[in-house]
Amino acid sequence: MYRAKSLGRNMYQGFTHEMREETQQRVKLETSLRGAAAAGQLQLVYQPKLNLANGTIIGCEALLRWQHPELGMVPPSRFIPVAEDSGLIMPISDWVLRTACLQAKAWSAAGLPATTVAVNISARQILQHDVAEWTLGILGETGLAPHLLELELTESLIAQDVDKVTATFGRLKDAGVKLSIDDFGTGYSSLSYLKHFPVDTLKIDQSFVRNMLTEPDDAAIVRAVIMLAHNLRFKVIAEGVETAEHCRLLREHRCDEIQGYYISKPVPAGEFEAMLRNGVQLPVCRA
């Protein structure tokens, strides 16, 4: 069943002995994941976001990492699907959001420049739980100002239940939480939803950004998304920025913010805090 789903659904797949091994590995991974947070194996790293107008850091994205005692660093692409299928995604997400909010609150209390922290929300969370109540509850517990939290939702998620997502977006937006659509341009939903959802930012998927220097079609898509977003009064952030040339072209096309290895890889909280204290600024992006 899992193999058929992974190959695109609407199909069948015969059993093989390799599948038995995959199933055993999946069960072992799920068992280990259940106690990962309590064992201190989960950690958050933070990837800076840069304002292209002045080259300063204006926020970060909190990214989950799992340091398994035997398997080493397990990539999210491997354990997040297991968490979603097993129902572990909610306790793990609760840990992620609470930890990110506490960290952002600590930065704010230390007098550092106002920094928004972005957290990804999965489809399973928003379709099966009251994400607005959950988010606002954690904000209240941690004391983080709502405008310093940004939730990132994928384009394909929005299309699955437009009414529920619209209601959730509305409650969060009214409370002051920032909202962004992640991986924009890779989903299959209608553009009409952009008229109704109170989002703040569109994130251009890194697959377009990375290839924009060599593929004219990708460059055209990047320009079109920036124009579309600005005409709808949204900000735009490009992820996957790896070179000074990426940075230069995005600024030329009036992209608002960038994120990627050209600025910094995801780093522990202490390293990100040092960047804020030192006022890191990229010369190529200065006004």
Image (cartoon, rainbow, N blue to C red):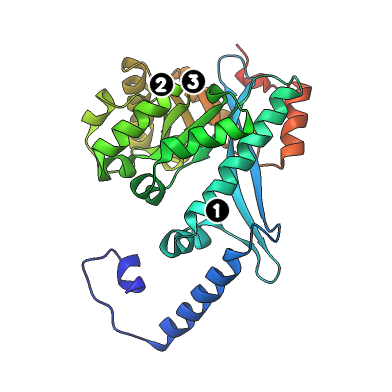
As measured in the structure, the alpha-carbon distance from the residue carrying label 2 to the one carrying label 1 is: 26 Å
Horizontal relation, residue 63 to residue 86: left or right: right
Q: Earlier in the sequence, mark 2 or mark 3?
A: 2
Residue 34 x/y as whole percent? 57, 65
Q: Dot 2: within a 10 Å radius of its alpha carbon, few (fewer than 14), some, or many (20 or more) residues? A: few
Horizontal relation, residue 117 to residue 18: left or right: right
Q: Is residue 208 visible?
A: no
Tell me the residue at 56%/41% (across/down). Answer: 97
Q: Earlier in the sequence, mark 3 or mark 1?
A: 1
Secondary structure state at the residue bearing disc 3: loop
Q: Is residue 268 visible?
A: yes
Kindly identify the amino acid type of the residue bearing the numbered disc 3: Asp
As measured in the structure, the alpha-carbon distance from the residue carrying label 3 to the one carrying label 1 is: 31 Å
The N terminus lies in quadrant: bottom left
Single out the residue that lies furthest toward the bottom.
17
Instruction: Depth check: give the residue in front, 6 or 260.
Output: 6
Q: Earlier in the sequence, mark 2 or mark 1?
A: 1
Horizontal relation, residue 287 to residue 124: left or right: right
Instruction: Depth check: give the residue in front, 137 or 274.
Output: 137
> Is the residue 269 above or below the residue 85 in the image?
above
Secondary structure state at the residue bearing disc 1: helix
According to the image, label 1 marks what residue?
A: 92
The C terminus lies in quadrant: top right
> Is the residue 9 above or below the residue 275 in the image?
below
Tell me the residue at 57%/25% (across/down). Answer: 148
Secondary structure state at the residue bearing disc 2: helix
Kindly identify the amino acid type of the residue bearing the numbered disc 2: Asp
The number of numbered discs placed on residues in the rendered structure image is 3
According to the image, label 2 marks what residue?
A: 174
According to the image, label 3 marks what residue?
A: 256
Instruction: Depth check: give the residue in front, 73 or 101.
Output: 101
